[in-house]
Image: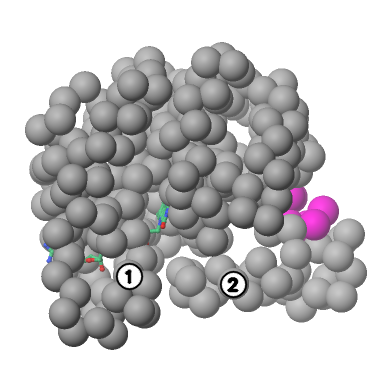
């Protein structure tokens, strides 16, 4: 099923992100994780592409098995900035042959070795060029990334929003956000999207913080704002991993309940391949998620 057909039907979708195991881990570990995630009945599962050092080669295989073996709709992430046109077309063919119907189209981060190479001529510079390629290829529902607090490379948030609109206008069906810890910043971003006429469903990316190293990495990669309430948790429980994990799960639940009250179209949980915290979150939100009073923003 195409993800565009799941959204805007009066329900908030709840989906998960997983990543292929690092090359040093056996492939089977991800299928053990998926056994446990399946019991939580997500609307779909996304599989990252080469993010955080995970293997690119396994994205299509895992996304295909999520659908065929686990009976859950899947979406394959795909990045383009270091790829050639030929390799992207081959990849689109592989994705189609694997029965996957959804792609999250991304530029990807530019590795330092490419930036420093003066002879490097990227065949794709921005995600919208990959989106053109996928639209041309045909047959997929296309998602793209958005950044409520601005993309890390951007010097000007107005331009960032202009480029987001350009990307959406090239054929995006829905957006998935970078993780954020401050819902108010997300709501302000939504208002700005409305003002510039970006009218596609937005799925909010939520990361339950499970350890302090993860928080440090997130700060480096995304530079996202950490509100005082969140910083107090980090200060208090930095040296008490068990309590930090409990507080991290409670914070994520609090964020999701607030987003459900807002009427968000979808919530995407960055599971970090950890089923147990994800299960705890799903249990805590289940009553609110299916409340009679639910009302999703209509677009
Ligand atoms: P773009 O939309 O192309 O934007 C990149 C930058 O270029 C922005 O600063 C933007 O303002 C600017 N820009 C865009 N268009 C133009 C233009 N026409 N002219 C000038 N400037 C422009 N990375 C991975 O490697 N693998 C993954 O699986 C992965 N999954 C992700 C999932 C989500 C939900 C998110 C939010 C990010 C993910 N990323 C992943 C990270 C992503 O690849 C990086 O953040 C990357 O740096 C930007 O990708 P993009 O598709 O948002 O780029």
Q: Quadrant of ligand 1?
A: bottom left
| Residue at which label 2 appears | 217
Q: Name the magenta segment's main secondary structure.
A: helix
Q: Position of residue 216 (x, y in %)?
A: 63, 75
Q: Position of residue 281 (x, y in %)?
A: 71, 38
Mark 1 and mark 2 residues within 8 Å of each other at the beta carbon = no
Quadrant in the picture for residue 10: top left
Q: Residue at x 55, y 54 (%)?
A: 54
Q: Residue at x 16, y 26 (%)?
A: 138
Q: Secondary structure at mark 2?
A: helix
Disc 2 within 8 angstroms of ligand 1 (CB): no
The numbered disc on residue 255 is: none
Q: Residue at x 62, y 54 (%)?
A: 22
Disc 1 within 8 angstroms of ligand 1 (CB): yes
**Residue 43 seen by the camera:** no
Mark 2 packing: few (<14 Cα in 10 Å), some, or many (20+)? few
| Residue at which label 1 appears | 110
Say which of 140 and 86 sits in front.
Answer: 86
Quadrant in the picture for residue 233: bottom right
Q: Which residues are magenta?
A: 245-251
Say which of 139 and 93 sits in front.
Answer: 93
Say whether disc 1 or disc 2 marks the residue closer to the N-terminus: 1
Of badges 1 and 2, the one in the foreground is: 1
Q: Is residue 207 magenta?
A: no
- Direction from residue 7 to residue 172 in the image, left or right: left
Say which of 190 and 164 sits in front.
Answer: 164
In the displayed structure, 141 sits above or below 208; it is above
Q: Position of residue 188 (x, y in %)?
A: 34, 58
Q: How many marks?
A: 2
Mark 1 packing: few (<14 Cα in 10 Å), some, or many (20+)? few
- What distance separates the C-alpha of mark 1 from that of mark 2? 17 Å
């Amino acid at each position: 099923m195409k993800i565009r057909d799941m959204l805007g039907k009066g329900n908030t979708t709840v989906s998960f992100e997983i990543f292929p195991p690092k090359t040093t881990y056996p492939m089977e570990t991800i299928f053990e994780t998926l056994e446990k995630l399946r019991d939580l009945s997500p609307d779909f599962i996304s599989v990252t592409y080469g993010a955080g050092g995970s293997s690119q080669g396994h994205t299509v295989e895992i996304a295909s098995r999520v659908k065929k073996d686990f009976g859950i709709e899947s979406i394959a992430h795909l990045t383009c900035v270091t790829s050639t046109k030929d390799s992207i077309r081959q990849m689109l063919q592989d994705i189609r042959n694997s029965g996957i119907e959804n792609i999250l189209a991304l530029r990807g981060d530019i590795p330092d070795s490419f930036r420093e190479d003066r002879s490097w001529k990227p065949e794709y510079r921005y995600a919208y060029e990959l989106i053109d390629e996928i639209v041309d290829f045909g047959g997929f529902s296309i998602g793209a990334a958005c950044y409520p607090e601005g993309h890390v490379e951007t010097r000007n948030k107005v331009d960032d929003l202009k480029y987001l609109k350009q990307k959406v206008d090239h054929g995006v069906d829905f957006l998935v956000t970078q993780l954020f810890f401050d819902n108010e910043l997300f709501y302000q971003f939504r208002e700005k999207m409305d003002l510039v006429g970006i009218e596609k469903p937005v799925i909010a990316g939520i990361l339950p913080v499970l350890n302090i190293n993860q928080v440090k990495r997130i700060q480096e990669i995304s530079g996202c704002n950490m509100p005082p309430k969140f910083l107090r948790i980090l200060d208090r429980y930095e040296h008490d991993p068990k309590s930090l994990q409990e507080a991290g799960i409670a914070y994520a639940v609090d964020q999701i309940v607030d987003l459900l009250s807002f009427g968000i179209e979808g919530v995407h949980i960055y599971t970090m391949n950890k089923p147990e915290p994800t299960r705890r979150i799903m249990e805590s939100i289940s009553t609110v998620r299916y409340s009679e009073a639910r009302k999703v923003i209509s677009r």
